[in-house]
Amino acid sequence: MSIKDYRRKRNLARSGEPKGSSRSPGDAPIFVIQKHDASTLHYDFRLEVDGVLKSWAVPKGPSTDPSDKRLAIETEDHPLDYAEFEGIIPKEEYGGGTVLIWDRGPYENITWKNDDLMPMEEALAAGHVLVRLKGRKLAGGYALQRIDDEKGQWLLVKMDDEEADARRNPVSTEPKSVVSGRTLEDIAEEEKDA
């Protein structure tokens, strides 16, 4: 796994995004979901795997309702220190727009096959991943299922467990960053005034 595509697509000196050298893997792998107001508002769902953040753009954001199947479009791997990034990418840069850390925390791989835990790299290659998130907004099991390899399209679905809640809509009711407590508008205003 590599972040060459990440670096190739960006002018990191101008964008202010992490270069990819300051964070080492910890004991437990992490996930991060960044709310990203770029050309269209979406949520970037990222899982730490083999020293990088495997990434998907989720146009409608994650759900806590197991009946919701959310499209997740695979994007380039990001460096681990991207999990700390919150701010504004200049409009003329790749992915230009405001980014906030909507949720994050550790996660656990729960992808089993033939009574063995499948390594994340193998599960991703097979196109079916099960994880248990331990975030502040999202918790419990989630499945990622590849539906179109050529287009990099996956589905992100909440598993039907004790954390499932069809009545809750965290995307619309919980807009703030779990790190700074700011909204996208707050970040944009503060950056403009800086």
Image (spheres, grey):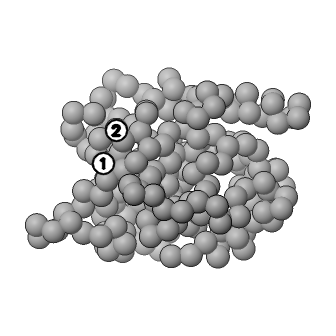
Give the percent coordinates (x, y) of residue 50.
44, 70
Q: Is residue 58 left or right of 187 when viewed as pictured?
A: left
Could you tell me which secondary element the residue under label 1 belongs to? strand
Determine the residue positioned at 72% across, 73% down. Answer: 8
Badge 1 amino acid: Arg
Count neighbours of disc 2 (C-alpha within 10 A) and say few if under 14, some if 14 to 19, many if 20 or more: many
Give the percent coordinates (x, y) of residue 14.
85, 58
Badge 2 amino acid: Ala
Determine the residue positioned at 21% across, 38% down. Answer: 161
Asked if 96 appears above or below 154 in the picture, the reply is above
Give the percent coordinates (x, y) of residue 17.
73, 56
Place residue 99 in its image quadrant.
top right
Would you say residue 68 is visible in this rendering? no
Determine the residue positioned at 32% across, 74% down. Answer: 122
Q: How many marks?
A: 2
Whether residues under marks 2 and 1 lie with C-beta atoms below 8 angstroms apart, the answer is yes
Give whichever of discs 2 and 1 has the lower sequence position.
1
Place residue 180 in its image quadrant.
top right
Asked if 131 appears above or below 149 in the picture, the reply is above
In the image, farthest residue toward the right? 193
**Location of mark 2 (residue):** 139
Distance between the alpha carbons at the discs numbered 2 and 1 = 7 Å
Asked if 122 appears above or below 181 in the picture, the reply is below
Quarter of the picture containing the C terminus is: top right
In the image, farthest residue toward the left? 115
Would you say residue 27 is visible in this rendering? yes
Could you tell me which secondary element the residue under label 2 belongs to? strand
Q: Is residue 27 left or right of 57 when viewed as pictured?
A: left
Disc ID at residue 132 = 1
